[in-house]
Image (spheres, rainbow, N blue to C red):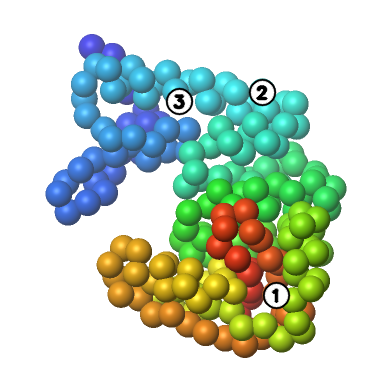
C-alpha cells in the first residue's frame, strides 16, 4: 500500500465535531481516508503542484504560482512571493491583488495579511479598479452610505447595496447584523463590481 507524503500526513486535521478528517495543505485540500486511491491522488496532486510552483518561481510567473496554491493559502503565498522573489510594478501588483481579493471567500480570516497587502505594500489602491469600476466610483457623490452583513463592522468588505448586506448577514442562518455607515468617498479603498456585490473596500478608522 502507498504511503502518504510526509508533508501531507502532517497536514491532516479534524475539522468538525463529527470527527471528519481532512488534508489541509497549500498544495492539496481534501477529505482524508487511508484508502489507496485517496493516498495516490493526494500524492500525485502534491508532487505536480510542488514541481509547477518551482517552475513558476523560476519563470517569475506570479499568476501560475498563485493559482497553484489552494484557495485558503493564496493570500499567504503572495506575501511569501513578495518577501522572496516577486518584484512587481505598481500596476501589476494591484491587478494581482484585485484578482486575489475577488477569489477570496473569507477576507476576515486573513485580516492581518490583507492589512499588509492593502495598506503596507503599495500605495494607490484605486488601481485595483478596472476602467468601468473607476468610472462608476468617480461618479459617486462625495459622501456615500455603505453596508456590511456580518458579526461586526471591522471587516474591509462593504457594499452599496443594503439587500446584499442583508443576504450576507443571513446566508448561513447565523442571524448576523447589518451595519450601516456613512463615509467620505475619499476614505474608500476601491469599488469592485466583479462579484455583482457593489462592493466597497473600506478601512474602518481606529
Numbered disc 1: secondary structure: strand
Mark 3: few, some, or many residues within 10 Å (few <14, many ≥20)? many
The answer to whether 104 is drawn above or below residue 149 in the figure is above
Q: Earlier in the sequence, mark 2 or mark 3?
A: 3
Q: Residue at x 79, y 73 (%)?
A: 139
Q: CA distance from mark 1 to mark 2?
A: 38 Å
Identify the mark at residue 46; answer none if there is no mark.
3
Q: Residue at x 30, y 21 (%)?
A: 39
> Mark 2 sits on what residue?
55
> Mark 1 sits on what residue?
188
Residue 154 can be seen, yes or no: no
Q: Nearer the viewer, residue 125 or 87?
A: 125
Q: Residue furthest left?
A: 18
The answer to whether 43 is drawn above or below residue 8 in the figure is above
Q: CA distance from mark 2 to mark 3?
A: 14 Å
Q: Are marks 1 and 2 in contact (CB under 8 Å)?
A: no
Mark 2: few, some, or many residues within 10 Å (few <14, many ≥20)? some
- Horizontal side of 118 relative to 135 (left or right) equals left
Numbered disc 3: secondary structure: helix
The answer to whether 19 is drawn above or below residue 39 in the figure is below
Where residue 142 appears, x then y in whole percent?
Answer: 77, 84
Identify the mark at residue 70; answer none if there is no mark.
none
Residue 7 can be seen, yes or no: yes
Amino acid at each position: 500500500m502507498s504511503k502518504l507524503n510526509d508533508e501531507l500526513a502532517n497536514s491532516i486535521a479534524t475539522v468538525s465535531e463529527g470527527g471528519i478528517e481532512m488534508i489541509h495543505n497549500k498544495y492539496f485540500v481534501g477529505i482524508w481516508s487511508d484508502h489507496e486511491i485517496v493516498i495516490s491522488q493526494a500524492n500525485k496532486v502534491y508532487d505536480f503542484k510542488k514541481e509547477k510552483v518551482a517552475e513558476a518561481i523560476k519563470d517569475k510567473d506570479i499568476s501560475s504560482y498563485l493559482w497553484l496554491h489552494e484557495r485558503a493559502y493564496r493570500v499567504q503565498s503572495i506575501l511569501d512571493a513578495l518577501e522572496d522573489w516577486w518584484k512587481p510594478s505598481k500596476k501589476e501588483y494591484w491587478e494581482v491583488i484585485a484578482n486575489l481579493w475577488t477569489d477570496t471567500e473569507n477576507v476576515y480570516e486573513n485580516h492581518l495579511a490583507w492589512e499588509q497587502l492593502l495598506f503596507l505594500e503599495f500605495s494607490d489602491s484605486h488601481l485595483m479598479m478596472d476602467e468601468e469600476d473607476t468610472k462608476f466610483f468617480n461618479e459617486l457623490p462625495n459622501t456615500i452610505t455603505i453596508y456590511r452583513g456580518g458579526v461586526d463592522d471591522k471587516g474591509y468588505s462593504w457594499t452599496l447595496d443594503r439587500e446584499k448586506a442583508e443576504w450576507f448577514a443571513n446566508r448561513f442562518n447565523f442571524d448576523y447584523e447589518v451595519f450601516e455607515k456613512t463615509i467620505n468617498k475619499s476614505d474608500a479603498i476601491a469599488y469592485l463590481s466583479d462579484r455583482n456585490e457593489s462592493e466597497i473596500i473600506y478601512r474602518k478608522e481606529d
